[in-house]
Image (cartoon, helix red, strand yellow):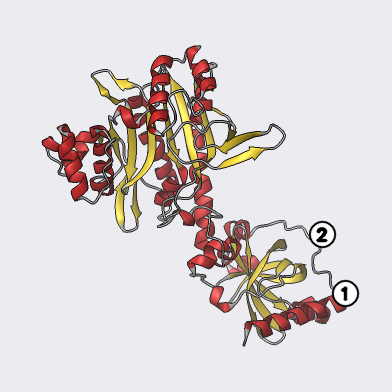
Amino acid sequence: MEESEVLRQWKERIKGLRAMGVELFPNDFRAEHTSSEISERYGDWSAEALAGLEETVSCAGRIMAIRHFGRAAFVHLQDRKGRIQVYLRQDILGEELFGLFKRLDAGDFLGVRGRLFRTKTGELTIEASSIQLLAKSYHPLPEKWHGLTDVETRYRQRYLDLIVNPKVKETFYKRNEIIQGLKAFLLQRDFLEVETPMMQPIPGGAQARPFKTHHNALNMDLYLRIAPELYLKRLVIGGVERVFELNRNFRNEGVSSQHNPEFTMLEFYQAYSTYEDLMTLIEGMIGEVARMACGSYKITYQGTELDFTPPWPRVTLKEALNRYGEVDGKVLSNRTAAASLAQELGLEVMEAESHAELLVKLFEQAVESKLIQPTFITEYPVEVSPLARRKGADPTVTERFELFIMGREIANGFSELNDPEDQRERFRHQAARKGAAEDDLSIIDEAFLTALEYGMPPTAGAGIGIDRLVMILTDSPSIRDVIYFPQMREKI
């Protein structure tokens, strides 16, 4: 049957219900139980025990399936906790109420009261003594959407995805469990949760293209934050020695299975600590959350077993180039050799790029995808780490790490640079590389530098990409599977 004909018939039934005086959207039914509460309490009761039970239950949910048998019917009712079967009989409900039920459809919301029993197949079921229509759906749930698989439809109409794909709802419940586990881990260690501005006059804290907006009353341009880093450091300067924010960041960049322009980050700072302390903290935190959410330190992601048991390997960037990328010593020590290899691998080489920057490019091309098990890569060059402290034994690199799992960057952290003069010089260098004039300090955060001049204690900070971590811990192939409403191209 053509969809337009289905919708026409659907609307006719709605008109019929209104003509009968049926309230299509009442709000006076109170559900006292959820499907899971009923199952947990009575799931192991025998048919005989249930027959002697005087207590009735009441629950509400969306009708997912209807099976008519003349003067009786079975429906599957779905609420926030799962599904339960309901049995409806005309001789119990009466002709009028059963007649109303026969005009309902899959997709409608129904309130049910009744006693429990077991069917011949042993399924725990509510025998309805009364029912009430709670909300009428104006659209059918077409058969093709049961087990909805069309990716475009799933992401654009997430509500349909949640209705018909139970595993999707499970993924988002687990996402919440993971986030609460991370927060609890930090709160137990005396971290303070805070909120910092999402609109900022200067887009700082990371190297990324920002979204720009304009505030009319103040007549000034603002940027959606690319990171909360410089504001969280201000709080450390103010004496909040352990601080974190679960934040939304915005980066005006590509969209892919691993990137969304709006994403969730957990960023935290701990005074009197180093990047090594935070690597230990992170492997303990993620390991514990993995065990809590997945039942074990060992999980399977897309067919690959991952082991989150601490400690995790710590490998310098140059060691990783040699060990995983099979890059020889000449490339590691000579810019010309590094540039030649980069070109062989099809990478664009800019004249202004330093040897260290080329090594990072080679690492991204030849090494990242090989870092499957949780691995910390350390000692990133100063040129690509403008906010990190230099390493004392080798001032060309920084006390910085990135965490990789399944070839993806999951976390980034470092011992913070707290020397205001060094920080100002690095900001200047960064501005010059972006093409700003030497006397144009518009992209340099003077307010942050002033705060830094008041003194920041030795501090280490890190950020964890929540969406990517949730992907791995829920065995989801795309970042869009773990974001309720991922950004999509406009539908033409």
- Quadrant in the picture for the C terminus: bottom right
**Residue 178 percent across, percent down from the top left:** 48, 44
Q: Quadrant of the N terminus?
A: bottom right
Residue 28: give its label. Answer: 2
Which residue is pictured at 75% across the width and 77% down the height?
101
**Element at badge 1?**
loop
Q: Classify residue 429 by image quadrant.
A: top left
Question: From the viewer's perspective, is residue 358 above or below residue 468?
Answer: above
User: Looking at numbered disc 2 in the image, what kind of residue is underneath it?
Assistant: Asp
| Disc 2 secondary structure class | loop
Foreground residue among 358 and 277: 358
Disc on the earlier residue, 1 or 2: 1
Residue found at x 43% / y 19%: 424
Left or right: 365, with 226 as reference point: left
Mark 1, Cα crowd under 10 Å, few <14 / some 14-19 / many 20+, is few
State the separation of the CA atoms marked 1 and 2: 16 Å
Q: Which mark is residue 21?
A: 1
User: Mark 2: few, some, or many residues within 10 Å (few <14, many ≥20)?
Assistant: few
Residue 384: x %, y % from top left: 34, 32
- Say whether residue 193 is left or right of residue 362: right
Which quadrant would residue 90 be assigned to in this image? bottom right
